[in-house]
Every structure is written in C-alpha cells, then in structure tokens.
Image (cartoon, rainbow, N blue to C red):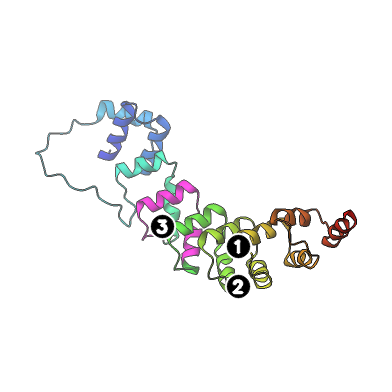
Amino acid sequence: MSQESMQVLKMLADGKLTVEQANQLLSALGEDQPAASVASEAQYSAPVPAPTPAQNPTPTPAPSPAGHYTIDQIIQMSNHGVEPEFLQQVREAGLTDLSFDEVIQMGTHGVDPAFVAQAHAALPDLEFDQIIRMGTHGVEPEFLQQVRDAGLSDLDFDEIIRMGTHGVEAEFVAKVRAAMPDLTTDEIVRMGTHGVDAEFLQQVRDAGLTDLSFDEVIQMGMHGVDPAFVRRVRELAV
C-alpha cells in the first residue's frame, strides 16, 4: 500500500474524510478495495514505518504528464466533486498544458474538456476564463466566429455572452446597428430576445411616436400593436 493511500486512511480515521470521499481518493490512487476493508487490513498488517532522518522540506510536486497527482491535489478533486474519469477526459482532449487549478475550474463548472479543446483550436486568442464562461453559458465557438464574421469586432466579451445566452443572432445585431446606429447593444439584445425587429422600430419613428420610451416600444412590439394604430388613437383623443 502506498504512502498516499495510508494518508487517506489516516484522514478517514481522523474524521476529515467520509467513507465515500476516501473511496474516491483510493480509487484515484489505484486501490481496488473499499476504504473500510483496506483500513481493516492496514490496521493489522501494515508495517510500522521506521523513523527517517530529518530532511530539508521540498516543494509539493506538480502533476506529471502521466497523471500522478499529489495527495493534496486529490483531496481538492474530492472536495470539488471532480472525478478521476474527468482527469482522463482532460488528457484525452490533449489539454496537457492546463494547470491543476484550471482543471479543477473546468470540473467545478461542468465544462466538457472536449469543448475547451474545440474552442481553443477554433479561437486560439481566447483566454481560458473566457472559454469557461462560454461553456458555462452554453455559447459555442461557432457563435463567436459568427460575431466576428458579422463585423461586430467592437463588442466586448460580456456583450457577446449576453447575445449568445439570449439566442440573439449576430446577423440580427449587425442589421439593426446598420439601420439604427443610435441603439445600444443591450437594447438590440432586448429587441432580439422579444422578437422586435428593426422594421418595427422604424415604423414607430415614422408614426411620429418619438416620445415613447424604449420599454414602451418593446411592449408594443411584444403585443403586436401597430404604431399607426397608436398614432390614430392619439389623434382622436386630442
């Protein structure tokens, strides 16, 4: 039994780990037996380690490409619910350049390693945190490419994420901006979210309803109210 496995059992005995957590850690360390049986065997058969001469402390080693993790890192995996299978998926996706903290961040947010690899390959200029946000909000790399193809290079990343989260197409935003450059990105996203197109806003302006707030215009569009109808009602009410 390895020294790491013995540490897991000691933490279990000290009440720092549950049996389930201990089993997960032992599985990651290659132990096939459950924690209870391994602990029982260790109690009666494990040799007492001989004292070793004091040595200068050494830094905690980083995981090797082969996937050997320190006991502290394995405990972090257990605490964050990151399964050993997830680490295997990270390696299979070719993400060997990621730090351990980045792997934990992926696992904590439920971002598929294959998604990270795909996004990095398609858009290598993206930062890791941006890819994680994309994965968290369900924004695909293809959507960011559509934003760039539509000439929306001035949008910041938060605006792009809002577009993707609300299902607002890049082509729609580009079309509205071209027709009404005075609108903000947030206003255009709201239009797209509620199914209000640029033609409707132009009808509102053509009807002389310039005193209406943007919320009122959106409300009209959502309920299918013709701007010309609003103008006639106002004229008769004078």
Residue matched to label 3: 91
Where disc 1 sits, the SS reads helix
In front of the other: 114 or 3: 114
Q: Which amino acid does the dot numbered 3 rest on?
A: Arg
Q: Residue 111 in magenta?
A: yes
> In x, y percent, where is residue 208?
79, 64
The magenta-colored residue range is: 95-120
**Measuring 67% from the left and 71% from the top, which residue is drawn there?**
175
Above-or-below relation of 221 to 146:
above
Q: Which amino acid does the dot numbered 2 rest on?
A: Ala
**Crowding at mark 1 (Cα within 10 Å: few <14, some 14-19, many 20+):** some
**Crowding at mark 3 (Cα within 10 Å: few <14, some 14-19, many 20+):** some
Can you tell which of label 1 and label 2 is closer to the viewer? 1
Residue found at the far left of this picture: 53
Residue matched to label 1: 185
Above-or-below relation of 118 to 166:
below
Residue found at the far front of this picture: 238
Taking the image as shown, residue 70 lies to the left or right of residue 187, namely left
Disc nearer the start of the sequence (1/2): 2
Q: Which amino acid does the dot numbered 1 rest on?
A: Thr
